[in-house]
Image (cartoon, helix red, strand yellow):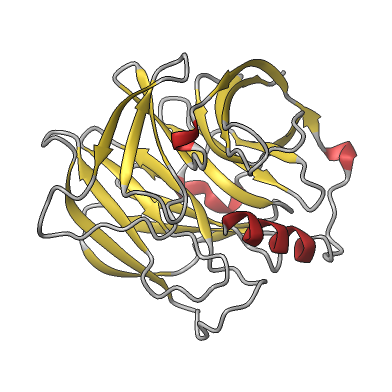
Amino acid sequence: MKNIYLLVGLILFGCSNKEIDSAEIDSAEIVSKIVLPKIINETSGLEFYNNNFITHNDSGGEPSLYVFNEMGEVIETIGLNKNPDFEIENNDWEDITNDNEYLFVADTGNNFGNRDNLNIIRVSKGTDFMVDGIIEISYSDQESFFPRPKHKYDAEAIIVIEDKLALFSKDRENLNTDLYLVDKNQNGSQILTSEVSYNVNTLITGGDYDEDRNLLALVSYNSKGNQYLLLFENFKLNNLENNTFKKFKIPLEQAQIEAVKIIDEKTFWVTSEDEGIGSPFMYKIEVK
């Protein structure tokens, strides 16, 4: 079903008159490629965990996290329905991030703008990955929940920054990304208002933030199926309006990059769903 959504989105996205000027874009280099198992064929988020990686599938899969090593082997499956106080579903899990205490899973995918149950699942690292909170979110300016293909109420990238969670939208209408801030310690309902909008001219699908380097990384694609890495250097919450980014084309075809993890200023892990044409992959990419 997700592949149908993607096809529809690409067709409609292709009707936009906002196309990238290739002169604005540098190229990244593929350093290595790791085949991932079919059990994570819709890998949509990526985090480090105890010298391994942790990921999850996209919509409709089991409400589980999957730990895999650098060989691409799944070594642990973590179900999130251990706490009877919370019934966890994988409606449309799009990204994962973490701080010292918690993992945060963004159930914020909203292909047609009609979901009224968007949420972020908070998972404690210290209690055998027990869910101990759900943050329900909505957008302050969303008035209609009628399904439509072009809207700005989808969010597929989440990061921890300072004491907040930052969500980045996938805006099919204007090809911008809005940044929304969420109190990561407050359960219950939070109504979000855009803090800033960046003219990325692509559709954002994943993100990561390195606090030590003040480096924000986002991944995205455009109507032609091109994949991109966007890097915001010296990214801080007190300077949102003045942040700028560099864009790098990832030299991949027939891929759908959904997640990114920063290694250092020049190297990054990204994962790609199988899109029904083979296996999911993880790539190490490098920029100049």
- Where is residue 52 drawn, in percent x and y? 36, 19
Q: Nearer the viewer, residue 45 or 195?
A: 45
Determine the image quadrant of residue 85. bottom left
Is 71 above or below relative to 210?
A: above
> Is residue 158 in sight in this rendering?
no
Is 181 above or below relative to 271?
A: below
> Is residue 7 in sight in this rendering?
yes
- Where is residue 168 drawn, in percent x and y? 52, 54
Identify the residue shown where x is 56% and y is 22%.
Answer: 35
Instruction: Classify residue 25 as left or right of residue 6.
Output: right
Instruction: Classify residue 5 as left or right of residue 41.
Output: right
Q: Which of 218 and 269 is in front in this view?
A: 269
Determine the image quadrant of residue 27. top right
Instruction: Classify residue 189 as left or right of residue 287.
Output: left
- Where is residue 243 drawn, in percent x and y? 60, 45
- Where is residue 84 drawn, in percent x and y? 10, 57
Q: Which of 163 and 9 is in front in this view?
A: 9
Is 128 above or below relative to 239?
A: above
Q: How many marks?
A: 0
Determine the image quadrant of residue 120. bottom left
Identify the residue shown where x is 66% and y is 72%.
Answer: 149
Identify the residue shown where x is 63% and y is 44%.
Answer: 275
Instruction: Classify residue 54 as left or right of residue 144.
Output: left
Identify the residue shown where x is 74% and y is 38%.
Answer: 254
Which quadrant does the C terminus fall into?
top right
Which quadrant does the N terminus fall into?
bottom right
